[in-house]
Amino acid sequence: MIDFEEELKKFKPSLEVEEAEEAIYNQDLTDMTDILREMMKEARRQ
C-alpha cells in the first residue's frame, strides 16, 4: 500500500508551478478600486 504521509514528505512542487505563482503575484492588475478612482478623477475634472 501507499504511505501517503511518507509521499507527502517527499513532495516538491515543480518549478513550473512556482514560476507561475510568482508571475501571477507580480502582475499589476487593474481592479474595481482602480477603476473607481479613475472615474472619480474624471468626474472632478468636469
Image (tube, rainbow, N blue to C red):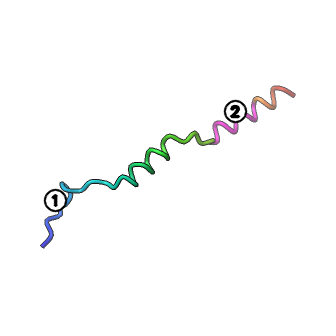
Given the image, on which type of amino acid does mark 2 rest? Arg
Looking at the image, residue 4 lies above or below residue 25: below
Q: What is the x, y in percent for residue 30?
A: 63, 41
Given the image, on which type of amino acid does mark 1 rest? Glu
Image quarter where the N terminus lies is: bottom left
Q: Earlier in the sequence, mark 2 or mark 1?
A: 1
Q: What is the x, y in percent for residue 38?
A: 73, 34
Name which quarter of the figure residue 9 lies in.
bottom left
The residue pinned by badge 1 equals: 5
Looking at the image, residue 21 lies above or below residue 6: above
Q: Residue at x 45, y 51 (%)?
A: 20
Q: Residue at x 59, y 42 (%)?
A: 29
Would residue 29 be found to the left or right of residue 18 on screen? Answer: right
Image quarter where the C terminus lies is: top right
Q: Residue at x 14, y 59 (%)?
A: 6
Q: Does the stretch in magenta take in 4?
A: no
Mark 1 packing: few (<14 Cα in 10 Å), some, or many (20+)?
few
Q: Which residues are drawn in magenta?
A: 31-40
The residue pinned by badge 2 equals: 37
Would residue 45 be found to the left or right of residue 2 on screen? Answer: right
